[in-house]
Each structure stands twice: as C-alpha cells, then as structure tokens.
Amino acid sequence: MGQKIEVKVRFAETDLLGHVNNASYFVYLEEARVEFFKTVFPEKKQSFVVASVKCDFLRQAFFDQWLMIQTKVVKIGNKSFDLEHAIIDKNSGELIATGRSVVVHFNFEKQASETITSEMRKQLEQAQHI
C-alpha cells in the first residue's frame, strides 16, 4: 500500500503531443519522496541524498488528469534504502508508471555516506507497514 499523495497534471508538464513529458514524472517522484520524508522523519534531523532514480512509463498521462503516487519502502540496507513508487490514474485506477529511488544516509560535513541509525531503521521498518 504505502503512503499516497495526489497530483493534478499541470499544462506546463505536458509536451507538444499533449501528454505528460517524461521529465515531469521525476518531479512527481520527488514530490512523493519529500512527503514520505516529512511523514517518516518528522523531526527533520536526517540528511539524505538520492543516489538513483528510475521510472518505467506504462501509459500516457494528460493535462488536468489526477494522479495518485504511492510510495513504499521495499529494501533497507546499511547506508541506504529503496523506495518503490506507483503512479496511478486516480479515477480509473490504471497504473501509469512505476519508479524506484535509492536514498542514501549522508553526512554533508564529511561528504560521505553514513550507516542508518537504529532509530532510523525502526522508522523505516514502520513505514514498510503503512
């Protein structure tokens, strides 16, 4: 299931063909990640960087369409975790695209990745069951 957000496709996110431009999907995934972080880590003390993002486009989306983005934790490693995203047409329930993000716990002072703390792991494990 995972955490859900809704996005209404704006005209600026479409291209000359009338469908959502592929780059816009990465903005939707970013918005979903930010909301995920706000929910799972409300204290805002953690530092993360995105190491990888991928998106598979399955169907077209269009201007003024309501999309629902579901985000869930699918893997927790020592220094990183993976999020899986599903972009779904809110009205029909059709799967539009899928995505995956690899997020690394990062120390900006040292400019190096760091081990996920036991508290962070606990929060991520709880998020797996949302």
Image (cartoon, grey):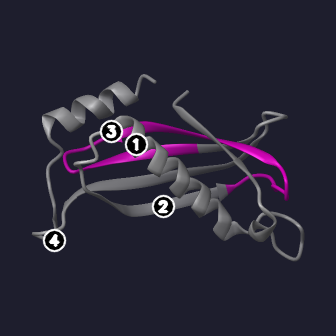
Question: Mark 3 Cα within 10 Å, few/some/many (few <14, many 20+)?
Answer: few
Asked if 42 appears above or below 126 in the picture, the reply is below
- At mark 3, the secondary structure is loop
Quarter of the image with the N terminus in it: top right
Asked if 15 appears above or below 69 in the picture, the reply is below
The kind of residue tagged 4 is Gln
Left or right: 19 in relation to 33: right
**Is 55 a magenta residue?**
no
Q: Can you tell which of label 4 and label 2 is closer to the viewer?
A: 4
**Is 83 a magenta residue?**
yes
**Residue at label 1?**
38
Tell me which segment is drawn in magenta. Answer: 57-85
Q: Earlier in the sequence, mark 3 or mark 2?
A: 3
- The image position of residue 107, as x and y in percent, is 16, 62
Q: Which mark is residue 91?
A: none
Taking the spot 14% from the left edge, 55% from the top edge, the residue there is 114
